[in-house]
Image: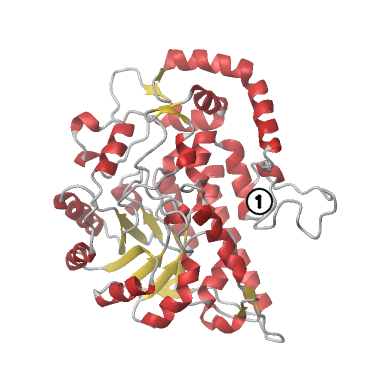
Amino acid sequence: MAHIDDAQQAPWKAAAVRGPTPPRLLGGLTWRGAALAGAFAVASGLAIAVRRRGSLLRQGRALPRFAPADRILAAASPAVLAGTPERRLYAGRDLTRAVTIEDLRATAHRRLPRFALEYLEGGAEDEATLAHNIAAWAQWCFAPRALIDVTQRDLSTELFGRRMAMPLVIAPTGLNELFWPHADRRLAEAAAAAGVPYAQSTMSNDPMAEVARVPGLRHWWQLYVFGREEIRNALIDRAHDVGCEALIVTTDAQTYGNREWETRNNADPKNLSWGTKIDALLHLRWLIAGLLLHGMLRFANVVDFVPKDRRRFFDSAMWIRSQMDHALSWDTVKRIRDRWPRRLIIKGLLTVEDVVRAAEIGADAVALSNHGGRQLDWAVAPVDVLPEARRAVSNRLALFVDGGIRRGSDIVKALALGADAVLVGRAVLYGVAAAGMPGAARALAILREEIDRDLALLGARSISELGPRFLARPH
């Protein structure tokens, strides 16, 4: 998503180390305080919900179950006349009834508290990059070929010398346990079952070694460069020792993006507002299944590098953020290339010149990415750069693209424009936030079904047949 791979300014304060002291939650509430607050929340919850709903409607923002599918503007579909037929996304628990990624998104919206949704959905500043990532796919239309025998279709492709079931990788995203217990493992399990790679983030919550034990997993590791060189080298060596196939070096997050909407849930930089806390307590299924049964979140893969007096969850996130290497350069990446013997992917490039430079230093792949719209606002969309980047490097390295992918049609367009595969973040996170591993698996199944159907309708029998001839760009 696609995506949310740095959680260095998490919006909630929690303890990273469990001990005999009674645990505290939601920025300083004790269990007794939480019970009292919960009682108050139940008493006032209906009024808050009604007021919130009214506020959303007054602002013209559709609630999830009324949101238009995909990128059709509210009430703008030619199939709708004066609000009829009324269209609602499915937001229930029966995953077989979730027929689009937007259905899973609606379920996630119903289940998660406001601050978790803001972390999942939000972007930087005016969220122009976030919006353009989605709009950019609409700049391309399909030009299907007729009278082609598409009885047999092949969605598989080869990447790094190995076959994969479809040209999709689950993108590295951090703080996933905010959405579902052990979400990193659940995403890895869904990826393995679907026959696609899973990229685990430095800021993930499940230990790298535990994720690596998922049977049949193509395990990739995403690296943030922070702190002393020994930290970077230790993480690289761990990824090698557990058998990770590829290392992804993220280049666009050395300075934290200005995610203004996240901060509006806070009373101060270190605490959620009371309204936000009460809203979280009202989401009992989320609260019980996660925090109460599994305890506080922690950055399991990096907490050992954090000073002992900074290992509380919020403090550790802020410390890591303060240690990001602002001097990260091509020389640094070259040293990483020299140390890492397997596939190297450079993520976060958005100019053709940088893609060419990556090929020159021996990278195996580049991920064109603007961090899911969460870093530099008004950045170009990755798909805007893709065709020229492919022409510039030909087949010297693999090209991945992410950003705003919600449909199989987005994936087919990326492949036709020259991508070897796509990185999908938010689309799969909606699934895991809705229902854990089965939800993530359903998200992947939906995308696979859409890719397969689009190939048939395009008159293409395999991924390898896709190319620019299947696309048109209306003026």
Q: Can residue 355 be seen here?
A: yes
Q: Is residue 290 above or below residue 338?
A: above
Q: Is residue 251 above or below residue 164?
A: above
Q: Is residue 324 above or below residue 20?
A: below
The C terminus - image quarter:
bottom right
The location of residue 249, given as percent across then percent down, is 30, 60
The location of residue 17, given as percent across then percent down, is 28, 29
The location of residue 373, given as percent across then percent down, is 47, 54
Residue nearest the observer in this picture, 75 or 398: 75
**Amino acid type indicated by mark 1:** Ala
Q: Quadrant of residue 11?
A: top left
Residue nearest the observer in this picture, 326 or 1: 326
Residue nearest the observer in this picture, 425 or 294: 425
Determine whether the residue tagged by mark 1 lies in a helix, strand or loop.
loop
Is residue 468 left or right of 361 when viewed as pictured? Answer: right
The location of residue 4, given as percent across then percent down, is 43, 50
Colour setting: secondary structure
Is residue 296 left or right of 472 when viewed as pictured? Answer: left
Count every numbered label the image shows and give the total.
1
Q: Which residue is mark 1?
A: 98
Is residue 52 left or right of 287 when viewed as pictured? Answer: right
**Residue lying at 34% horizontally and 42% vertically, measured from the top left:** 8
Q: Can residue 180 be seen here?
A: no
